[in-house]
Amino acid sequence: MFFKQLFDKKLAQYSYLIGCQASGDAIIVDPMRDIDQYYELAESEGLTITAATDTHIHADYVSGLREFAERGVTVYASDEGDKDWKYEWLLDSDYNYELVTDGDSFSLGNIKFDVIHTPGHTPESVSFLLTDGAAADEPMGILTGDFVFVGDVGRPDLLETAAGQEGAMKPAAKALYQSVVQFKSLPEYLQVWPAHGSGSACGKALGSVPESTVGYELRFSPAFNAATTENEFVDFVLDGQPEPPLYFGRMKKVNKEGPVVLGTLPNPPKMSVSEIVNTGGLIVDTREAAEYMEGHLEGSLLAVFNGSFNTIAGSYADADADLYLVIEEDNLEEAVRDLIRVGLDNIEGYVTPRMLRDWDGSLTSIETIDFDAVEEHRQANDSIVLDVRKATEYAEGHLPDAINIAHTRLADELDKLPKDKQLLVHCAAGGRASYASGLLDKEGFDVQWVDDDYENWEHKYADKKDKAAAQ
């Protein structure tokens, strides 16, 4: 058996290429949308991809399952859960597909996949027990998707907090508890292969180790240690979950109804700065924050080309907008992959940072300040402080009277902010606040970016009165 775990660092996502070396067949588990990477790897190993599967309807990226179906590959998809969470694009289609439920199994050469329904993170979630029939008649591991991570379990609140299904999170948490109880009966030697690692917003405390075992998770995972009773587990798993990025709800809908088939990656042309300005499209500026603040094209968003790039672009950009990038040419292909993975397909052109520097047109800027200046504004009572950290961070301490909206949810809550007052935007160290400042500037707010560490304000200005008010 050939087994390869592939990791996308920006989305903290694991997919798997598993192949039977006797038959030459291979399957991809939880594929991303740019499936050319899997074909390239399979070919290098002398394997042919004949099947693909998802463990559930994903919320954090566009699945590659439909791209595989378009190429005639057999796709396996869960038929568990309620009527609202089915793979609608597969039903009654001409694709070569098989719907699976708890207790089903399918094989690929000598490799057997046994299906276990593991609801909670999503109603239709399944896990796969993997048996290498050439070596054994019992499973060696389990592909858990977003059910069990290393050191955590999948969050059960997303149908409510991301997809807007009111009242869904507590029943989902109870379903997750039952899945956890079922998991406890598995052999402890089984390897655990999750769909995400550290950095994913699909849980609150995912480990960075790429795999685990059932026994290790039962002994040391805080989530399993909390599963002594249903009530204790439900309270634990719902407490402190981070705000999901705004695009998560859109991803659930896209993966349920069916992503647009790409076939090949978009290939945006190089344009002049004047040309992209005149298109009226959405400009995404990938330069460092300080460069953007000093001068950027009016109406452009900041999404620095780093580990947060696709999360920021996915949370701030309209999926139907024509996108134009300010980006180094060497980063263009990777940026295109990042964008299509979160459903931003209309990438129509780009310019380089040097072209922008050499342009003789006008740029707009955002003033950069520190917490000393914030305190001066506070004392003058002439501005509003916007804290774009997570709610859990805000609860631990914040500036008095600061408004708190997590930076990845901001685009949906702009109506909570006044346009007749200046906004002083901060986070813990400036990074998240820079993205939020760019969005607010684009939307016509009067903004100052706080490029400073929150701890500096605490040390210098949080006297006893302020500390009491901030609690």
Image (spheres, helix red, strand yellow):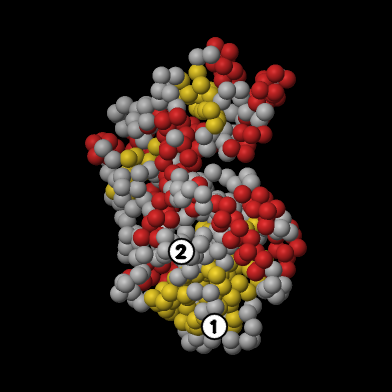
Circle 2 residue: 82
Q: Mark number for residue 217?
A: none
> Residue 324's spot in the image, x, y percent?
32, 43
* First-in-chain label (1 vs 2): 2
Q: CA distance from mark 1 to mark 2?
A: 30 Å
Up/down of 425 relative to 105, above or below: above
The secondary element bearing badge 1 is classed as strand
Quick check: 234 left or right of 245?
A: right
Q: Residue furthest top?
A: 380
The secondary element bearing badge 2 is classed as loop
Callout 1: 10 Å neighbours few (<14), some, many (20+)? many
Q: Nearer the viewer, residue 320 or 228?
A: 228
Circle 1 residue: 111
- Badge 2 amino acid: Asp
The N terminus is located in which quarter?
Answer: bottom right
Up/down of 381 relative to 61, above or below: above
Callout 2: 10 Å neighbours few (<14), some, many (20+)? few
- Residue drawn at 47 percent across, 75 percent down: 100
User: Residue 219's quadrant in the figure?
Assistant: bottom right
- Badge 1 amino acid: Ile
Q: Nearer the viewer, residue 306 or 86?
A: 86
User: Residue 251's quadrant in the figure?
Assistant: bottom left
- Residue drawn at 32 percent across, 40 percent down: 282
Q: Can residue 150 be seen?
A: yes
Labels in figure, total: 2
> Residue 94's spot in the image, x, y percent?
30, 74
